[in-house]
Amino acid sequence: MSDLLERLRGRGWRMTAQRRVVAEVLDGEHVHLTADEVHSRAVAKLPEISRATVYNTLGELVSLGEVLEVATDKRAKRYDPNAHRPHQHLVCARCGAIRDVHPTGNPLADLPDSERFGFTVSEVEVTYRGTCPNCAAA
Amino acid sequence: MSDLLERLRGRGWRMTAQRRVVAEVLDGEHVHLTADEVHSRAVAKLPEISRATVYNTLGELVSLGEVLEVATDKRAKRYDPNAHRPHQHLVCARCGAIRDVHPTGNPLADLPDSERFGFTVSEVEVTYRGTCPNCAAA
DNA sequence: TACCTGACTTAGACATTGTCTATCATAGCC
DNA sequence: GGCTATGATAGACAATGTCTAAGTCAGGTA
Ligand SMILES: [Mn+2]
Ligand SMILES: [Mn+2]
Ligand SMILES: [Zn+2]
Ligand SMILES: [Zn+2]
């Protein structure tokens, strides 16, 4: 994620303690936090960071294509730092755990012309739902 | 949708003017309204119906499996009366128009075991995004 | 038909998530 | 070190959703 900060600095981003902290919080694999979760974790590292700044920073990262918004649950948006490798999501219906997954095949090919209603289709999002090993054991 | 009301009466549902109106509003194909949209249209038919009742009724219909919740946009949930024929959604990124679509093949088969992380996967949601003919023309 | 009762509806308070504005602080340039 | 535009902040506001206490009525009963 430090390369992210470099890229952004190259694009004229001012480097602030707040932005660094948000980037740190988003670092890792299978990370899909809500804005409030990002804020809580950011506060642990930089107590005075405000909600507005977290929202602003997340919005900028999304605009810049460095973070994805995903809507796997039907409540808050989640923010996904894995923006450079296309992937889909596998969600535990019980506990909400989310994993990045890479299905084979091209789901676009599964939508015949007769089902396109004249749309130009450019993108597909797939969400797999099920039960994670932890929840299955309990 | 009148068969719906019959089914529900059979399950012990009390038939009220409010529930009838919500069911009427949800009647049709490619219907994917937000709770507020359902409320507005319901008010046109029954001015005194409350927001709480619309939310309650939609929630009950979802619990009973008669209506689906879909999260095609990242804001309000949408309510889909097409609960008995499995289908996916095609969304116009510009105007938000939503069509029911029926892809060929089984998307579950595209998720290899190595990408399942020990989950028991039971369900797949697919959202196709693109531009509708109207928006493409404009 | 008239009544009774528990299920239903209502208004509005409250909660959660997200946006906006006015003001204050500071990163990065000179 | 000082300037200035960009960024951060608190808190008001907006949109969506949940809950509660009180009143209403659908449908069974006599
Ligand atoms: Mn992801
Ligand atoms: Mn649908
Ligand atoms: Zn789980
Ligand atoms: Zn359109």
Image (spheres, coloured by chain):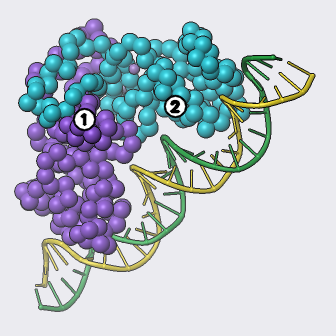
Chain colours: A cyan, B purple, C green, D yellow
Q: Chain of mark 1?
A: B
- Whether residue B10 appears in this view of the structure is no
Q: Nearer the viewer, residue C1 or B55?
A: B55
Please give left or right for residue B125 compared with residue A84 in the image. Answer: left
Q: Is residue A92 above or below residue B15?
A: above
Q: Amino acid at mark 2?
A: Gly
Q: Quadrant of residue A71?
A: top left
Q: Assign the N terminus of chain B to one quadrant of the image.
A: bottom left
| Location of mark 2 (residue) | A59
| Percent position of residue A25, x then y | 57, 21
Q: Which residue is mark 1?
A: B136
Residue A83 horizontal/vertical position (percent): 43, 17
Give the alpha-carbon distance from disc 2 to disc 1, as whole Å: 27 Å
Of A40 and A2, nearer the camera is A2
The answer, for residue B131, to whether it is visible in the render is yes
Q: Residue B62 placed where, x, y %?
A: 24, 48
Amino acid type, callout 1: Ala
Q: Residue at x 22, y 27 (%)?
A: A121
Mark 1 lies on a secondary structure that is helix
Name the residue rendered at 8%, 59% in the picture: B2
Image depth: mark 2 or mark 1 in front: 1
Disc 1 CB within 8 Å of nearest ligand 4 atom: yes
Q: Are marks 2 and 1 in contact (CB under 8 Å)?
A: no
